[in-house]
Image (cartoon, helix red, strand yellow):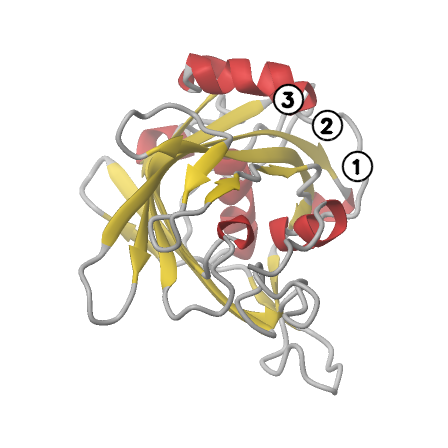
Amino acid sequence: MDIQFETKIDFKSPQWNRDAWARIHGDLNPDKEKVTACSGTILAVQAGTKVKEILGFESFLVTRLLPLEGGSYRRLNREVIYYRDVRSGELIDEWKNPWTDEVVDVVQVANDPFNYTISDTLILAPEDFGGDSKPEPRRIPLIFPWKRMNDETLTLTTDMHLYYPNALDPKKWVRESSGSMVQISEMMRYFVSIKDLENPELTAVPHVGTWNRVTPWLPWMLMGDTAGHLLYMGTMTCSDNLDIVPEDAQEYARKHHPQFLSAPTEDYGPSLSSLELYARNQKPAPSS
């Protein structure tokens, strides 16, 4: 299979950024999969008190890239986030809320699919997203803020800050919804070998990095509009197989989400957020 891609590092080239981004997230060979795994801690942040560690998490996704006309790639994947007891480290299906002393059912994240297109342009959501008007999204050349750490390593920063209507209407989801709007940020850092990026034999590029996420209380915590938010602090890595995923998380997936152990082979949808899936699959909790 003859796979063409840009290897000469050029931070100002949208095509090089596209190909580098695709090789980090997946493998340009559509017959191959790439596994990305992330584990870490979830912190509760409230004014007037110290930050509290409340959960651990284990996340992984398996990705396949399909080539599109014009040099773009369709990124196909499924992704999960499983929650751990912060002290024992065991995967949990129930959690005792430390503020209410209520034992609640944990709703794991299982997004199938979560697909999007990697191209040489970046589509920006309208700044008044969620308002009455529906302006067209803006398209800008795909140019990332790369930095050279040293002669061997590049770092890539991708930050995303969103504010959009909540799929969980607080009038219906009284105990689950944080409010009518959702404020979420994701901050990712990738560390990549320069030699790997310049290697024409590598259709996929290894990386390590960090994933941080600022989000409202998870709906299954039944915190409603209680002041405060969560901060995910995770470290991530990748491989061409599931060996980087802890065995207990693999076993949990085999039992509950076996299809998540491999990447999709064709494009389908829609791709929904975890809040949208929660609204579809769960029922509002009775009032306390």
**Which disc, if any, is residue 267?**
1
Of residue 101 and residue 131, the one placed in the foreground of this image is 101
Label located before the other in sequence (2 or 3): 3
Task: Report whether 132 appears left or right of 213.
Answer: right
**Distance CA(mark 1)–CA(mark 3):** 22 Å
Q: Residue 173 placed where, x, y %?
A: 65, 63
Quadrant placement of the C terminus: bottom right
Q: Nearer the viewer, mark 1 or mark 3?
A: 3
Real-space CA distance between mark 1 and mark 2, rounded to the nearest whole angstrom: 7 Å
Q: Amino acid at mark 2?
A: Pro
Can you see residue 48? yes
**Any part of residue 262 in sight:** no
Give the crowd class for mark 2: few <14, some 14-19, many >=20 residues within 10 Å: many
Above or below for 286 versus 95: below
Residue positioned 76% across, 41% down in the render: 68
> Image point 42% across, 51% down: which residue?
10
Residue at the image position 45 percent from the left and 29 percent from the top: 92
* Image position, residue 203 (x, y; %): 54, 26
Dot 3 amino acid type: His
Q: Which residue is mark 3?
A: 256
Q: Image check: 267 left or right of 226?
A: right
**Mark 2 lies on residue:** 264
- Between the residue at mark 2 and the residue at mark 3, the CA separation in whole angstroms equals 17 Å
In the rendered image, which quarter is residue 73 located in?
A: top right
Residue beneath the point at 23% across and 35% down: 152
